Image (cartoon, rainbow, N blue to C red):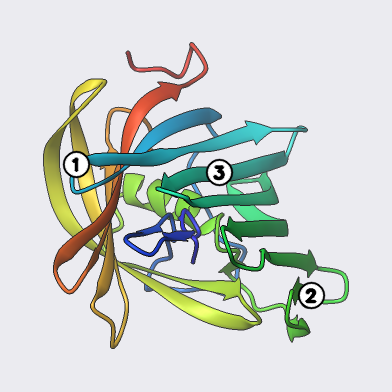
């Protein structure tokens, strides 16, 4: 998953790689639609980030969650990064419903534009009446059975951060991505204070781990701001590849803790 999605997608240049947001689900999987939080509605927000590598600024990113109807939501994640003459722009969007504390993904779209490379596109649609998932990218079209308790590459971060808020620790989710069902596993690493442009913030640190891979993605979720990621760091072979740092967070006035 780009993270958020792919939680987070990835940004790769000749000198650096940024992979954002791909997050995931709890070990106890059920046959029910995934539950999210003990709220009648989800908290809308806009989180703005700066992209760094080894302390140098490489770009910016923004993640937004908005309600478009009573039970219909749209989640978006956009990144812009550049290194010399190499430019990367990625966009992801996820439309889903949230009702009775349950999420149902409806449609996912992503695009990945890089200098000197062919633009990549992916679309995933969830057809609950026919119980199938339809997907399409530049290379293929595909159809898979609609597996219970499944998410798209971007929506997975929303479920993860809310389950962390409900005190669940090690997490594991099933995600439709690139014509297959993939497992995203996260490990709870404890609490940590971090310094940000918004001041010192208490966070819960969670890491996505991959089997047979040296790549990891670490997430610092603010306990003061509905567990929204305030820092995301990608590493490979134990070395930092790219980091997102929160610059600004917009919340509804009544929902803000500051």
User: Looking at the image, which residue is at 51% across and 79% down?
Assistant: 182
Q: Is residue 41 visible?
A: no
Secondary structure of the residue carrying tag 2 is strand
Q: Pointer 1: residues within 10 angstroms few (<14), some, or many (20+)?
A: few
Number of the label disc, if any, that sits on residue 90: none
Nearer the observer, disc 1 or disc 2?
1
Rounded to the nearest whole Å, what is the CA distance between mark 3 and mark 1? Answer: 21 Å
Residue lying at 76% horizontally and 83% vertically, measured from the top left: 140
Q: Is residue 13 above or below residue 47?
A: below
Q: Which residue is rendered at x = 15% and y = 64% of the image?
A: 239
Q: Is residue 245 above or below residue 184?
A: above
Residue 144 visible to the viewer: yes
Q: Which residue is mark 3?
A: 78
Label 1 secondary element: loop
Within 10 Å of disc 2 (Cα), the crowding (few <14, some 14-19, many 20+) is some
Name, please, the residue furthest toward the right.
129
Which circle, 3 or 1, is nearer the viewer? 1
Q: Kindly report the distance in space between the C-alpha atoms of the residues bearing marks 3 and 2.
A: 23 Å
* Marks 1,2: beta carbons within 8 A: no
Q: Could you tell me how far apart the alpha carbons at marks 1 and 2 are, in whole angstroms?
A: 41 Å
Image location (x, y in percent) of residue 44: 56, 29
Q: Of discs 3 and 2, which sits in the foreground?
A: 3
Residue 43 position in % (x across, y down):
52, 31
Q: Quadrant of residue 238?
A: bottom left
Q: Would you say 215 lies left or right of 86 here?
A: left
Residue 4, horizontal then vertical, whole percent:
47, 53
Residue 48: image location, x then y, percent = 44, 31
Q: What number is the disc on residue 134?
A: 2
What residue is pinned by disc 1? 55
Decide: is 244 above or below 218: above
Whichever of callouts 1 and 2 sits on the residue coming sooner in the sequence is 1
């Amino acid at each position: 998953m780009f993270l958020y999605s792919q939680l987070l997608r990835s940004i790769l240049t000749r000198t650096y790689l940024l992979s954002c947001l791909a997050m995931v689900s709890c070990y106890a999987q059920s046959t029910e639609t995934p539950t999210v939080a003990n709220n009648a509605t989800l908290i809308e927000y806009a989180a703005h980030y700066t992209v760094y590598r080894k302390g140098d600024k490489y770009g910016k990113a923004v993640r937004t969650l908005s309600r478009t109807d009573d039970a219909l939501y749209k989640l978006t994640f956009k990144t812009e990064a550049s290194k010399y003459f190499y430019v990367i722009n990625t966009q992801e969007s996820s439309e889903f419903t949230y009702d009775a504390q349950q999420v149902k993904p409806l449609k996912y779209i992503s695009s990945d534009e890089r200098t000197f490379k062919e633009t990549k596109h992916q679309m995933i649609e969830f057809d609950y009446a026919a119980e199938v998932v339809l997907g399409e990218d530049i290379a293929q079209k595909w159809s898979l059975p609609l597996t219970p308790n499944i998410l798209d590459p971007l929506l997975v971060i929303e479920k993860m951060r809310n389950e962390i808020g409900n005190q669940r620790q090690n997490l594991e989710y099933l995600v439709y991505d690139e014509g297959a069902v993939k497992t995203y596993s996260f490990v709870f690493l404890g609490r940590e204070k971090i310094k940000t442009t918004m001041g010192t913030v208490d966070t819960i640190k969670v890491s996505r781990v991959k089997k047979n891979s040296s790549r990891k993605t670490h997430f610092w979720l603010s306990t003061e701001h509905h567990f929204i990621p305030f820092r995301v760091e990608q590493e490979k072979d134990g070395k930092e590849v790219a980091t997102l740092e929160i610059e600004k967070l917009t919340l509804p006035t009544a929902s803000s803790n500051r």
